[in-house]
Image (cartoon, grey):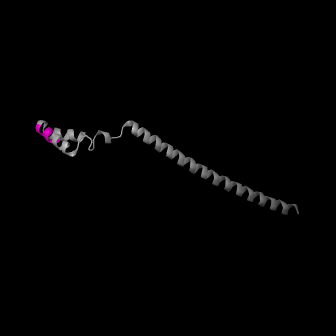
């Protein structure tokens, strides 16, 4: 792994041998903390898969909660309508 001193020595040597522009381009191509700090495609795939699972679980929980509210609401409304129609029918029959 390249520490800051080693990076600095390499940068100076590149400037001596290849010039400032090439040295700057080559140093800019290196990751600042070493190659081990970079995420691989597999790392990204794993993180995206975990994110997808969390989003799916969140969506399913919200959908279940919304469904429960909808069922409770429609059941209450149906019971109220049955009661109203029952009262109207009872009044009409008299």
| Magenta stretch contains residue 41 | no
Residue 30 at x, y = what percent? Answer: 25, 40
Q: Relative to residue 51, is residue 21 drawn left or right? A: left
Q: Is residue 91 above or below residue 31?
A: below
Task: Name the image quarter holding the C terminus.
Answer: bottom right
**Towards the viewer: 46 or 82:** 46
Residue 3 at x, y = what percent? Answer: 23, 44
Residue 72 at x, y = what percent? Answer: 67, 55
Quarter of the image where one finds residue 74: bottom right
Quarter of the image where one finds residue 36: top left
Q: Relative to residue 84, is residue 58 drawn left or right? A: left
Q: In the displayed orientation, state which residue is furthest to the right.
A: 94
**Towards the viewer: 76 or 65:** 65
Q: Relative to residue 81, is residue 36 drawn left or right? A: left
Q: In the displayed orientation, state which residue is furthest to the left.
A: 16
Quarter of the image where one finds residue 25: top left
Q: Residue at x 50, y 46 (%)?
A: 54
**Region rendered in magenta:** 11-16
Q: How many marks?
A: 0
Residue 71 at x, y = what percent? Answer: 67, 52
**Towards the viewer: 35 or 94:** 35
Secondary structure mainly formed by the magenta segment: helix
Q: Residue at x 87, y 60 (%)?
A: 93
Q: Relative to residue 71, is residue 87 drawn left or right? A: right
Task: Name the image quarter holding the N terminus.
Answer: top left
Q: Is residue 32 above or below residue 76?
A: above
């Amino acid at each position: 792994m390249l520490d800051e001193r080693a990076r600095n020595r390499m940068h100076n040597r590149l400037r001596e041998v290849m010039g400032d522009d090439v040295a700057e381009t080559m140093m800019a191509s290196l990751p600042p903390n070493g190659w081990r700090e970079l995420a691989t495609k597999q790392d990204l795939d794993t993180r995206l898969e975990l994110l997808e699972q969390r989003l799916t679980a969140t969506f399913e929980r919200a959908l279940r909660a919304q469904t429960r509210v909808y069922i409770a609401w429609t059941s209450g409304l149906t019971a109220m309508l049955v009661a109203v129609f029952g009262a109207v029918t009872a009044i009409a029959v008299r």
